[in-house]
Image (cartoon, grey):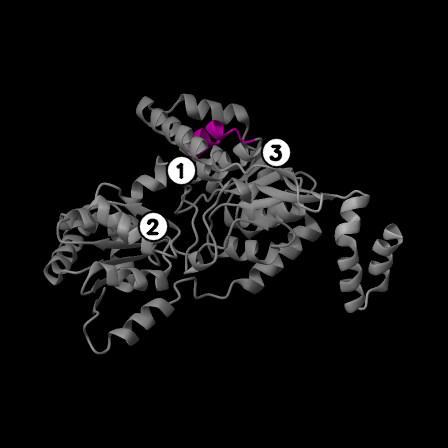
Amino acid sequence: MRRLDASDPGFAAAFDALVDDRRESASDVSADVAAIIARVKAEGDAALTDYTARFDRFDLDSSGWRITAEDCAAAYAALAPELRSALDLAATRIRAYHAAQLPEDRDYRDAAGARLGARWRAVDAAGVYVPGGRAAYPSSVLMNILPAKVAGVERIVMVTPTPGGETNPVVMAAAHIGGVDEIWRVGGAQAIAALAHGTDRIAPVDVVTGPGNAWVAEAKRQLYGVVGIDMVAGPSEIVVVADNRNAPHVIAADLLSQAEHDPTSQSILFTDDGAFADAVADAVAAIIPTLSTAATMRVSWADNGAIIVVPRLTDAIALCDRLAPEHLELAVDPAEADALFARVRHAGSVFLGRQTPEAIGDYVAGPNHVLPTGRRARFSSGLSVTDFMKRTSFLALDEASLAAIGPAAVALAGAEGLPAHALSVSQRLN
């Protein structure tokens, strides 16, 4: 764990190193992924059968390619009542939050008399990738499916690896709540390739979303343009800005909530009190051995964790902006949280006040937990309804409005050396 103090002479260089640290997979998987994509495009279902047998250790033809709606409904019905209620609550809140994101069509006339506007429509089909290994999270199923449903996507396809042929019943229950149309028991880069290019069994989709390992992320990167994607996501991260009025063990738990995701996850604390920083570090060390994810947290905290002491908490915000974190907690009094939030420029999602842990946002708050990582919050946003929609602009002119703006178009077409453009307009003017 790095310990930095903004008053130290070497702080700027040390913080630069923290910002520039790349935690994505060090292995070069691009060539392997390119080969997988090419093979799926050429061989279709036969390639999927081979890759599934090799990586997931079961035969698709004998075990079955699909998980049925009946299977998902049965999994939902078999849940413990408390868990079923928790999933239902999460779905209700996620659905409501994203319904409020639906964009409005525009249709108006401007001063020249031209009719202008834009119309929003959902894509025809969306694919959702659901991991089946370390990160099999029913919350991610809801976070990816429900915005597509709210957007009005008519066909939602889920792909998920089922190692050894085993399914995760809570994931299946979440798929039932979300209302998935198809579930295919394939995973990895080959599943992304199938969604993008299609096979005899799996029809192609227009957008692919959902988390995955380095191979899945690289497949999405390479296939962007064939399909739309949500983002290329890297390891999870959290930045907490906290004063000494917080309980150290509470802030320690917040930091560890992301450290337990993966050894490459990152947790960073900014505080204006050195003694509080020490207390949080001690609390982290005390909590780790008590939790089942201790092995993962220990590596994540040792390799990527940081505690940074600043003169004032307001000084932390500019540093946070350079990190552009996936999650930012402002663990201070409500008024101060609002004041600090007003200064924030770059963050995937922000959690305001001492009683708003990031973990709430992962499950039941409503805003999407699929967020940009690796400083990508500088230029991108979390998953939303509009990721499953596209905007079509339109224009309608009459003789008067064409006469008002057409001569300028003729002049610009001439300046660009495009005479047919100019002729297309001028013939109507004449």
Residue closest to the eye, 2 or 347 = 347
User: Which amino acid is tagged 2?
Assistant: His
Q: Please tell me whether the stretch drawn in magenta is mainly helix, strand or loop.
A: helix
Name the spot of residue 196 as percent of width and height, x first: 63, 48
Q: Is residue 197 left or right of residue 255?
A: right
User: Of helix, strand and loop, which one carries label 2?
Assistant: loop
User: Which amino acid is tagged 3?
Assistant: Arg
Q: Residue at x 71, y 47 (%)?
A: 112
Q: Which residues are magenta?
A: 171-180
User: Which amino acid is tagged 1?
Assistant: Ser
In the image, is residue 292 above or below residue 237? above
Q: Is residue 388 left or right of residue 81?
A: right
Q: Residues within 10 Å of mark 2 (few under 14, many from 20)?
A: some
Q: Residue at x 24, y 57 (%)?
A: 298
Q: Residue at x 52, y 23 (%)?
A: 70
Q: Which residue is mark 2?
A: 261
Query: Does label 2 or label 1 sit earlier along the sequence?
Result: 1
Residue 70: numbered disc? none
